[in-house]
Image: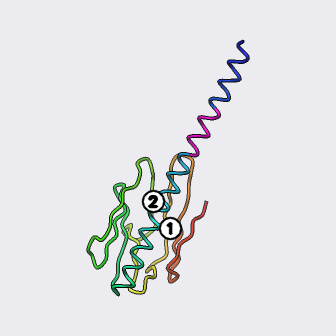
Amino acid sequence: MLIVIFIVSIISFTMIVKTITIYNTMKVNNTINLIGSSYNFLQTKAIINNEKGYIVIENNKISAFLNNKLIGERKIEKNINITMSFKNNQIHINKNGNIASAGHILINCGKIKRKMIFTIGQGRYYVQK
C-alpha cells in the first residue's frame, strides 16, 4: 500500500513540475508575441506616416511612440523579467521602418529564457533560446 502511494506521489509531483514549465514557456512566448506585434505595428506606422518612433518596455508595459506621441500600450504578465541592451531601454525605428541601433531583449520566467535579437538595418528580429 505504501509503495502504491509513493509511486502515485512521484507521478503527481512530476506532472506538477511539467505543468509549471509549460505555463512559464507560454508566458514567455506570449511576451515575445506582444513585443513582436508592437514592433511590427510601430514599424508600419513609421513607414505610412514617414515619422520616427520608439518602443519602451517598463513597469510591465510595452509602450509605442510615434513622433513622441503614445500610439499604443500593452500590458505584460507579472513574473516576467525583461532586460534590454538598447540605449535608454528604447527600440528606435527610423522613417523607413528599420531599427536605428542593434540590440537584444532578454525575457525570463522561471527557468525559461529567450532572447529577441534586433539587427540594424533589416527591420526584423529573431528569437534565440
The mark nearer the N terminus, 2 or 1, is 2
Q: Which mark is drawn over residue 104? A: 1
Q: Would you call the spot at circle 2 few (<14 residues within 10 Å), some (14-19), or many (20 or more)?
A: some
Answer with the quarter of the image where residue 50 lies.
bottom left
Query: Above or below — where is 108 with respect to 2?
Result: below
Q: Residue at 58% across / 44% down in the picture?
A: 21
* Residue stretch rendered in magenta on the structure: 14-22
Residue 17: image location, x then y, percent: 60, 37
Proximity of marks 2 and 1: CB atoms separated by less than 8 Å: no
Q: Amino acid at mark 1?
A: His
Q: Nearer the viewer, residue 120 or 38?
A: 38
Q: Amino acid at mark 2?
A: Thr
Find disc 2 in the rendering and name its residue.
Answer: 83
Q: Is residue 37 magenta?
A: no
Q: Residue at 53% across / 65% down in the picture?
A: 116
Query: Above or below — where is 4 with respect to 84?
Result: above
Residue 96: image location, x then y, percent: 42, 86
Mark 1 lies on a secondary structure that is: strand
